Amino acid sequence: MAPITPMQQYLASLASLVEPAESLEKHGYITRPLSEEDLLGKQRCTGCGKTMSRLSRRRRPPLVEPTRLDPANNQLPAISQPHYPSTPAQMVAEDDEAPTATPQQEPRIHCRFHPGDLINRVWICCNQSPSAPLCSGAYQHSPRSQGLRELIELHQCYPTPWTPPRGNNICEAVALDCEMGTAASGDPELIRVTLVNYFSKTVILDNIVKPDVPMQHLNTRYSGVTWADMKNARKQGTSLKGKAGAREKIWKHVGPHTLVVGHGVNNDLRSLRWIHTLVVDSYVTEFGRVKLKEAEELKLKKAEEQKLKEAEAKTGNLTTLDASKNSEDLKIPDSGTLTTPNDPAATTNEPPRVRKPGNLLLKTLAKKYLDRDIQTQGKKGHDSLEDAIAARDLVHRNVVDLVGRM
């Protein structure tokens, strides 16, 4: 798609697609710096590796050290008089209670994991395949020992700085896309960042990002980034130094009033540890369109049902004779609800299924609205430049639609 002229009417329509902060938060955006409580929730369990914020509510229950499960039944061995040495700041999974034991019932295992590494597709802790049952467990989740300073360095997010524009470097709108690998901790880690001028379509940044934490893998199947790419970028001096280095480069072109366009931009901003709320997200826009369409369809369906009921009431469709004739086809349960034998709700008591929103993947929307095939490289992964431009063109289509209706 050709460059776009930033006319006043177009800019107003583009700005009208910016989501309010409340909507962004519902879609997982971080709109303010993380509190101490938020940062502590980023700690991961020493056993299963899941984050405490995902696993738990904050309590201070006792803990038992990880214990090898019985391979025969995948359970902890029997303990006649369990002892749980206490440790500070423990967190327990939602609805889990402190472990208790009776002669008839052993305490429940809350945390299951393989304590060894997966090497050559074998867990070295139990010498079994990757799909083998988890061989160890503990009665409670235990957060890794990380100080607040370390958590801030790893996870704190920073808003776009209010620095005055230098020359003409600050853009009115940009398209953003990032690629992420997986850190040794299990957290997503930024490994490539792409920034495109929304109006001129000029590529501002398209750089490999050297991770500032140890990596588990680069997720090449989706990120498209290989270790050879990392090595070549470092040799050529084109790689950016971690998330802070990427933010610094971006902020030379993005100010507090710059519109950031993308698809699922919350993931990109999170990977950059960046807070920016002037966002036009093609995923959120399409999600809202789908939900609005579903609401309209439901409203029409209810209106039709109401008209049908009114028509039946006027014509006296169900007479006394008809009711007697059809009495064998009707079942009146104890609750007094009238149902038919073929009605699934008569036996399951489940609410009717609600149709889920359609496929909102960038690849699907690009094909549907732009007639463009993207992400076609299979296991070679995505191209963040291709994805950024596709998201930009989807948003442009929405703006043109808005301008046409004015």
Image (cartoon, rainbow, N blue to C red):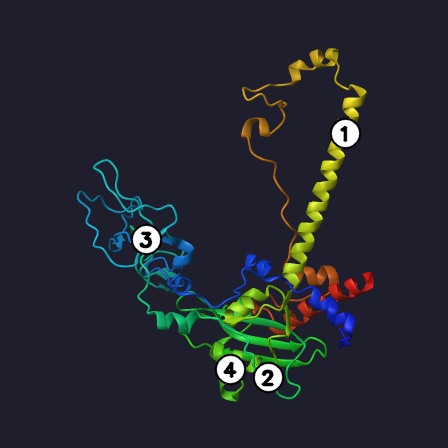
Which kind of residue does numbered mark 4 sit on? Leu
Q: Nearer the viewer, mark 1 or mark 2?
A: 2
- Kindly check if marks 2 and 4 are in contact, taking CB atoms under 8 A apart as contact: no
Spot occupied by residue 229 in the image (x, y as percentages of width and height): 52, 79
Q: Residue at x 69, y 15 (%)?
A: 326
Q: How far apart, in angstroms, are the residues tagged by discs 3 and 4?
A: 40 Å
Of the image marks 1 and 2, the number of the one nearer the N terminus: 2
| 205 or 222, nearer to the observer | 205
Q: Using the image, determine if residue 252 lies above or below residue 352.
A: below
Q: Label 3 neighbourhood size at 10 Å, few (<14), some (14-19), many (20+)? A: some
Q: Nearer the viewer, mark 2 or mark 3?
A: 2
Helix or strand or loop: what does disc 4 sit on?
strand
- Kindly check if marks 1 and 4 are in contact, taking CB atoms under 8 A apart as contact: no
The residue indicated by pointer 3 is: 59
Which of the 4 quarters of the picture holds residue 287? Answer: bottom right
Q: Nearer the viewer, mark 3 or mark 4?
A: 3
Q: Residue at x 59, y 30 (%)?
A: 345
Name the mark on residue 84: none
Helix or strand or loop: what does disc 3 sit on?
loop
- Kindly check if marks 3 and 1 are in contact, taking CB atoms under 8 A apart as contact: no
Which of the 4 quarters of the picture holds residue 100? Answer: top left
The residue indicated by pointer 2 is: 164
- Kindly check if marks 2 and 3 are in contact, taking CB atoms under 8 A apart as contact: no
Which kind of residue does numbered mark 3 sit on? Arg
Residue 131 in view: no
Name the mark on residue 240: 4
Of the image marks 1 and 4, the number of the one nearer the N terminus: 4
